[in-house]
Amino acid sequence: MKLTKAVIPAAGLGSRMLPFSSAVPKELLPVGTMPVFQYVLSEAYRAGIETIVLVNAAWKTALDDYLSPDRGRLASILGTEKERMLDSLMQLARAMEIVSVDQPEPRGLGHAVSMANPIVQDEPFAVLLPDEIILQSPGVVADLINASDDTTGAIAVIEVPREKTSSYGIVAVDNDGSEAPGITAMVEKPDPADAPTNLAIVGRYVFPQGFRSALQDLQPGAGGELQLTDAMRDNLDRFPLRAVRVSGRRFDTGNPAAYAACWQAYLDAPEAFH
Ligand code: G1P
C-alpha cells in the first residue's frame, strides 16, 4: 500500500500537563534536545510520509514555528559548528510538507481527524497522536502500512492491565493466530467489567482509501466526544482493520510520570531514540 499523508491531531490543551500546557504546547516538551513532536514526525518520515496535516488550535502557533525554523532567529549560529544541532530538524522541515488546519473547538479525536478531510480527500492516510513516543525500528507506522492493503487498515495495540481499560479504546480480534488478526469489535474507554479484552489502541492508525467518509455524521460517544473509535467500529464492514501489536517501549508523554520515565529511558540509552 502506498501512503503519503499523515494526520497529527494536536489541538488538545493537554490538561494533564497544566499549568505548563496553558501557554506552551505539551508536544514541545523535550526528551534530550528534541521535542516529543519531532520524534513523532520522524517516525512518520521513516514510514515514507510526505505530507503532514497538522490539526491545530489557533493558540498553538509554536508548533508551526518549530517546523519552519526562521533563519533570522537562528542567524547567530548559522555557519558555526552549532548549526549541526539543527540538522535533524532542518532535514524534516525540508523533506515533508506540513499543512496546518484549524480545529475551532475540541470536540474529540474523531472530530479532530475529520478536520483533515479536505486535504486527505479519498487517499489512504495515517494518524499519529503527537504525545506518544514508541521506540521501535523502523517504526510503528511502517509496520501498520505493511499490515494494510487497499481495502484494509491497521491500528497499533498493546496489552494493558484490566483496571486500565477505561483509559483506552479496546478491541477484540479474530482468534486465527495470525500476526495481524482482524478486529471484530471496538469500544472506547469501557469499564473493566465491560471490556471485551485488555487489548488497547495506542496512538498510531493507518486507514485505507475512502475512510474519510466514516468520519462524517459522527454522534457523541464516550465523554460526550466525537470518537475516532466509534467511527472505526461503525464502519468495520466497509473498512476492516487489523490489530498490530507494538513491540517497542511506548511512552504517553502527556502524562507527567510517563514523561519522566521517557526521560529516564533516554538517559539510560539515548541511541534507542534515534
Ligand atoms: C485516544 C483514543 C483511544 C486510545 C488513546 C491512546 O484517547 O480515543 O482510543 O486508546 O488515545 O492513547 P485519549 O488518550 O486521547 O483520551
Image: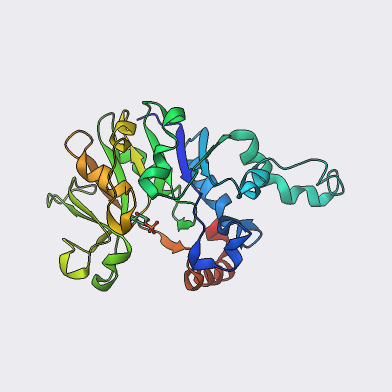
Residue in view at x 65 percent, y 34 percent: 94
Residue in view at x 73 percent, y 51 percent: 85
In the depicted structure, whether residue 14 falls above or below residue 3? below
Image coords of residue 179 (percent x, y): 23, 49
Query: As rendered, which of 202 and 106 lies closer to the eye?
Result: 106
Image position of 154 (left or right of 55):
left
Ligand 1, seen in the image, is in the quarter at bottom left
In the depicted structure, whether residue 129 falls above or below residue 46? below
- Of all residues shown, which one is farthest toward the left? 175
Image coords of residue 101 (percent x, y): 53, 37
Image coords of residue 153 (percent x, y): 29, 38
Query: As rendered, which of 188 and 59 lies closer to the eye?
Result: 59
Image position of 245 (left or right of 77):
left
User: How many numbered markers are drawn?
Assistant: 0
Residue 253 visible in the picture: no
Hey, which quadrant is residue 199 in on the image?
bottom left
> In what quadrant of the picture does the C terminus appear?
bottom right
